[in-house]
Image (cartoon, coloured by chain):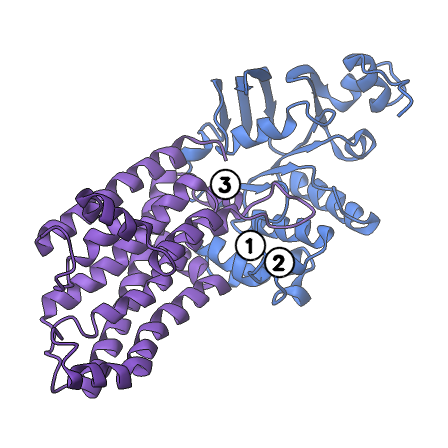
Amino acid sequence: MITIDRVSKTKSRTLILHDVTFEARPGRVTGFLGPNGAGKTSTLRILLGLDRPQSGTALICGRPYGKLDRPLTTVGALLDGSGAHRARTARAHLRWVAASNGLPDSRADEVLEVVGLTGDARKRAGRFSLGMSRRLGLATALLGDPEVLVLDEPVNGLDPVGIRWMRTFLRDSAAQGRTVLLSSHLMGELAEIADDVIVIDKGRIVIQGRLADVTGDHHTLEDAFFALTAAEADRPW
Amino acid sequence: MVSLVRAELRKLLGLPTAWVGLVLGTLMAPAVVLLNAPYTRRAITAGTLTDTSDLGLRDLGIGLIGPMVLGVVVVSSEYTSTSQNAPGARQLTATLTAVPDRLRLLLAKTTALVLIVAAQAAVTAAATLTLTQVLHGEHAPVPAPARVAAAILYWTLTALLAYAITLITRNGIVPLALLIINSTVVSVSFLLSKVTDLAAYLPDIVGTRMFIRGTDFPVEIAPVTAGLVMTAWVAVLLAVGAVLFHRRDV
């Protein structure tokens, strides 16, 4: 369970998040939708304790991220990049992360297998393609077999096979009772996997609810999105 | 806490740059003693080198590049971009999601660094001083254990100094260039000491007073005082670094 309550954040005197409030519930895939720069990543970074809000609270299972004991056993997070230093092998990266949360070394090889990177375990992260980096990042998120997954643009950089794999993986995770929160600016992609949708624009939540409710009378989620955000859909680019 | 320190040890020892620091730092001082041996022997015979009480200990200085590299890289590796595809992505994100308590994280990092550098310093001091005894035994007195311990402390504090500065700058290049140039090519601290006696209290200069007895210092500072002054420098910089690290958005 993820609870974001009236989170506001100012950066360089600009209000980038304004009273952001929403929930992501267990057993469901919650899609966090918005154009680039709308505040999706900022919200997720506050949720993960990386950045601090000016006001409001972001809780995971009722506690702020910083107060979680061995957080990887509760939350798995995938942000930009893999998080692995270029000079480190995939396995070495996963092993130090595992050690920091008291997890056994054997978890490294287990999660590498889950994401299909077993053959690249001894390869340095700096030589990974974008898609492989995303997989390594996801492997890191899965180390502690967490009940909550927080993913920022997880399909970015994945090839069609990877996208399909990620979609199935996230759906299965939710089916097993996990809370899955993922951000995306790809409306078509979100419409494929999300149960619930939260739309953010210019730092404010525009609408939230079940996918069907958010889409409403509009033909697609994309139509609904443009109607809601009054974005200039007819711009030449 | 033990698992955190273990993770930080693994992290540091998994970096090729850290090994450059370990190997260079450990080998340079004994190598210099070996290469300088004919010159040192001639100087002793000719009577130009009469004060041999610092022999060996003084040579340790060249190896300081090791603790400096280790102190810098333990922080800078967190901030280097992890890939060209995602310029903003850094290891620090993985570190802080795994260990969100930033002060505990710093404590673990500091402990790992101190353990590695103290071990390196002990090995280097033992090798350098043994070599000095083998080569110039009849002229060089065996240094008191307290002086050797002080030299190991100096190495450790130097690593912590580099570490604290990098915590503040969040970038390894500036502190590393500054520290290495200052300790090898042109010592700004030394030049300053020609201008004002106060420069004798700069951390790199005052620290050597813990174990070097030579007389070319403008101000007389007792070893214990020297140790306390350098520790104070490190403590202040570490405190500033820790506060910034705690407050900053990643």
Query: Mark 3 — on which chain does it sit?
Result: A
Subunit that carries the residue with mark 2: A
Name the kind of residue labelled 3 in the image: Thr
Taking depth in this image into account, of A134 and B195 the one nearest to the observer is: B195
Q: Colour of chain B?
A: purple
- Respond whether the residues carrying marks 2 and 1 are from the same subunit: yes
Q: Chain of mark 1?
A: A
In the rendered image, which residue does mark 2 sit on? Answer: A125
Q: Position of residue A234 (x, y in %)?
A: 91, 18
* CB atoms of marks 2 and 1 within 8 Å: yes
Which residue occupies 54% across, 24% down? A3
Distance from the alpha carbon under mark 2 to that under mark 1: 7 Å
Q: Which mark is residue A85?
A: 1
Q: Earlier in the sequence, mark 1 or mark 3?
A: 3
Looking at the image, is mark 2 or mark 1 earlier in the sequence?
A: 1
Q: Identify which amino acid the numbered label 1 is placed on.
A: His
Q: Position of residue A115 (x, y in %)?
A: 67, 55
In front of the other: label 1 or label 3? 1
